[in-house]
Amino acid sequence: MKRIIYIALIVGTLAVPMLTQALTVGPVKLEYSVQPGDTVRGEMIVQNEENIERTFYPSSERFIEVNGEKRFSKDENNLSSWFVMQSSITLKPTEQRVIPFTINIPSNADPGGHYAVIWWSTASPQESPGKQVSIVTRAGVLVYVRVAGDIVEDGSVAKFLVNGAHNFFASVPLELSIHFQNSGNVHLKPTGEFVLKNLFGSEKAKLAINPYGLQILPNTSKSLAAEWKAENSNPFGFYKISYDAVFGESEQVAQASRWIFIFSWSPFIWILIVLLAILFIPALIKKYNRWIIGKSGSSGLRE
């Protein structure tokens, strides 16, 4: 009897529906260039991905980057306190809605970059943490604002690497990367290309430096990488790799180049076989001819 009860309890537990909360917001990021005192109007999309009606609440936080990771914090004296939007929205199952918002730029806003995220969550900002018993879902839109004034666009490439700090390689693909340092007071989005040429100057590849449009915040650095997969699976010889990184509204350029050597074993083995053939086949042919002549001479004497 106990076994039946235990089985019933297990089956009953497994039969309890697992409610998952899903929320989609977009776009991933918004960028604005403004003047102090401006009023900016924008829009974002919020969609309820669940099959039940949900109410979502907005909030905002400042963000910075530390070692390539975003850190969020509550701070009333920055962009996160400049947003104005409705206090909540209720969406039917799978409903999507365009949500307007306003950014009021203070007249005394510091020039340069300001960064915040607008979160949408199932948790009300007024709700007591002790009463929150469900899993909270939240998703956000990153907002980048450039306030005009004394703007400093100062960037440089600290490192230019190919598969780390190497110059000799036995195979492909190769990872090309630059470590870009932003020393200014506004975010930068480097663009440009890596260009690969062989020893004779023939162009073998062009690869975008920053295909996803990554932003680099002030006083931070970020690695921008691309992978080269050669059309020839066994490239061999010297290659020159260069880059041109363009950044800022003033379109400054950082550029450099370096040589690498790819020593693939497959072509080397074929070259070695050809060299051995050139060296030894003539000697073998001569030896074979002497043997034939000698054999013919011996046969003539016996007759």
Image (spheres, rainbow, N blue to C red):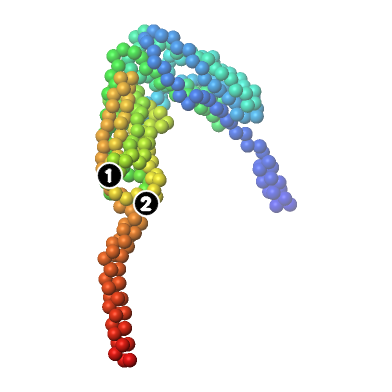
Image quadrant containing the C terminus:
bottom left
Q: Earlier in the sequence, mark 2 or mark 1?
A: 1
Circle 2: is it few (<14), some (14-19), or many (20+) Cα within 10 Å?
A: some
**2 vs 1, front mark:** 1
Label 2 element class:
loop
Give the residue drawn at x 32%, y 50%: 236
Q: How many circles with numbers are drawn on the protein?
A: 2
Residue 129 visible in the displayed image: no
Whether residue 182 is situated above or below residue 112 in the rendered picture: below
Residue at mark 2 to residue at mark 1: CA–CA distance: 16 Å
Residue 148 visible in the displayed image: yes
User: What kind of residue is marked 2?
Assistant: Asn
- Residue 98 is marked as none
Give the residue drawn at x 39%, y 8%: 37
User: What kind of residue is marked 1?
Assistant: Leu
Tell me where residue 96 appears, x and y as whole percent.
60, 23
- Residue 234 is marked as 2
